[in-house]
Image (tube, rainbow, N blue to C red):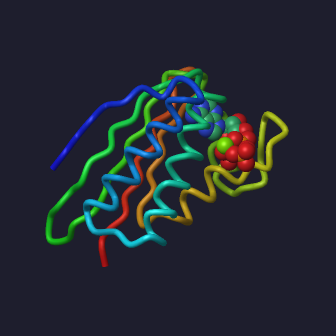
Amino acid sequence: MSEDKLPVKNESDIISVRSFGRNLAANAGFGIVDQCRITTAISELARNAVVHGGGGSVTIKTIQNDKKGIEIIFRDEGPGIVNLELALKGGYSTVGGLGIGLSGAKRLMDEFQITSSAGKGTTVIIRKWLK
Ligand SMILES: Nc1ncnc2c1ncn2[C@@H]1O[C@H](COP(=O)(O)OP(=O)(O)OP(=O)(O)O)[C@@H](O)[C@H]1O
Ligand SMILES: [Mg+2]
């Protein structure tokens, strides 16, 4: 089990976090396709933390109960997501983006939990299990 809290404050942090996640996923036994899914989800959520959340942090670790998997937790203390339901549906962006980051990350992972409220920041927990 390895655990590390990494800063997600700028473009170079996004790159580091993405590569940290890929290495951990590969070491945990995920194949190339799942490594891609995981790193894409990481990139989208990391970018959201930087662009919308004013920067935050991430914890990436392997987890094990009856199954083995990877768990990634993003936290920021930015403005939060005012309309969470809309943001999760996809196609909604407050910055003129495509609005596919959150919905895409959700689709790519096995589990996706988000807590966000206006003024209180955003926490996103994603998990993928080895099949
Ligand atoms: N960490 C966050 N803090 C505050 N608001 C957020 C956060 N993440 C997402 N949002 C809000 O949810 C919306 C949808 O996010 P999503 O990632 O799906 O799209 P986007 O970032 O606007 O565009 P892109 O398709 O390029 O990712 C954002 O436009 C933003 O308003
Ligand atoms: Mg986004």
Q: Is residue 37 visible?
A: yes
Asked if residue 84 is positioned above or below residue 103 in the image, the reply reads above
* Residue ID at (48%, 27%): 76
Q: Position of residue 130 (x, y in %)?
A: 30, 72
Q: Residue at x 51, y 63 (%)?
A: 37
Could you tell me residue 38's position as x and y percent? 46, 58
Q: Tell me if residue 122 comes above or below residue 39 in the rendering.
A: above
Which of the pair 95/13 is nearer the observer?
13
Q: Position of residue 42 (x, y in %)?
A: 50, 48
Give the image location of residue 59, x and y in percent.
33, 38
- Image position of 8 (left or right of 2): right
Is 102 or 25 nearer to us in this picture?
25
* Side (left or right) of 86 relative to 26: right
**Furthest-right residue in this view:** 96
**Quick check: which quadrant has ligand 2?**
top right
Q: Considering the image in quadrants, where does the C terminus appear?
A: bottom left
Numbered marks: total = 0
Q: Residue at x 40, y 54 (%)?
A: 22
Q: Is residue 62 left or right of residue 108?
A: left
Question: Extreme bottom residue here?
Answer: 131
Residue at x 45% of width, y 36% of height = 16
| Quarter holding residue 25 | bottom left
Q: Determine if residue 83 is in view.
A: no
